[in-house]
Image (spheres, helix red, strand yellow):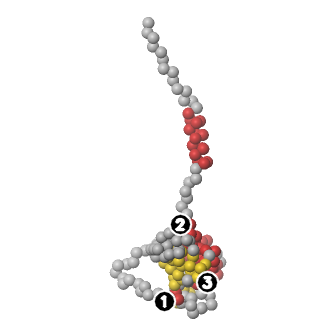
Amino acid sequence: MSNKRKTPGLNTGSMSDITFLLLTFFLITSSIDTDTGIMRRLPPPLDPNNPPPDMDIKERNVLKVFINKNDLLLVQNQVMTVRDLKETAKQFLSNPTDRSDFPEKVEEEIPGLGTVKVSKGVISLKNDRGTSYDAYIQVQNELTAAINELRDDLSKRMYGVKYADLTNETYINAISKAIPVAISEAEPENIGD
């Protein structure tokens, strides 16, 4: 007489329910990191057949923005809060009253806009190696917002809609040429306190 006993099988009927509950738990309780980066397209590389552009920029055409390791902001050697940076950058780039200490403007013929005055202003951003990522992003956001608002103002004045709502490529290129993203960013270094 054989004394073989059958091995009892596992009841797997509820395994799919448990798996689904675990998946739901992890989806609800997990926080997925989202990119908070900045959408900016780098300029195309220079044509090697053309001579390099003239890099001499007059002092009045540069808005110097520094962020130190303590996340303090220094704009044109003045301490400033991030909250005030956007308006300062807008005033600087647009130079509405043609101040002599603000950037020069040159008249350019831009298809879709006609003859417009284009600012030669450049924002020079430099940060310390110890600058926090949050402070860096806040400054970038304010500078980008300043340029976007200037573009929106010109687009509304010329075409009646915001720059982001433009669909005509000629108009988009015209506004982009009239108000370029003129932000120069240097390598981080140890600026100090």
Q: Is residue 4 left or right of residue 159?
A: left
Lateral position of residue 55 relative to residue 168, left or right = left
Question: How would you rate the neighbour count of disc 2 (Cα within 10 Å): few for under 14, some for 14-19, many for 20 or more?
Answer: few
Residues tagged 3 and 1 counted as in contact (Cβ below 8 A): no
Residue where numbered disc 1 is placed: 58
Residue at the (60%, 48%) spot, across then down: 29
Amino acid carrying mark 3 in the image: Gln
How far from the left and from the top, in percent, is residue 143?
57, 75
Query: Quick one: label 3 or label 1, which is nearer the N terminus?
Result: 1
Nearer the observer, 96 or 143: 143
Residue at (53% x, 81% y) in the render: 64
Which quadrant is home to the N terminus? Answer: top left
Q: Position of residue 43 (x, y in %)?
A: 45, 75
Q: Residue 181: where, in percent of width, then height? A: 52, 77
> Which tag is nearer the camera, tag 2 or tag 1?
2
Q: Secondary structure at mark 3?
A: helix
Q: Which residue is mark 2?
A: 133
Residue drawn at 35 percent across, 79 percent down: 48
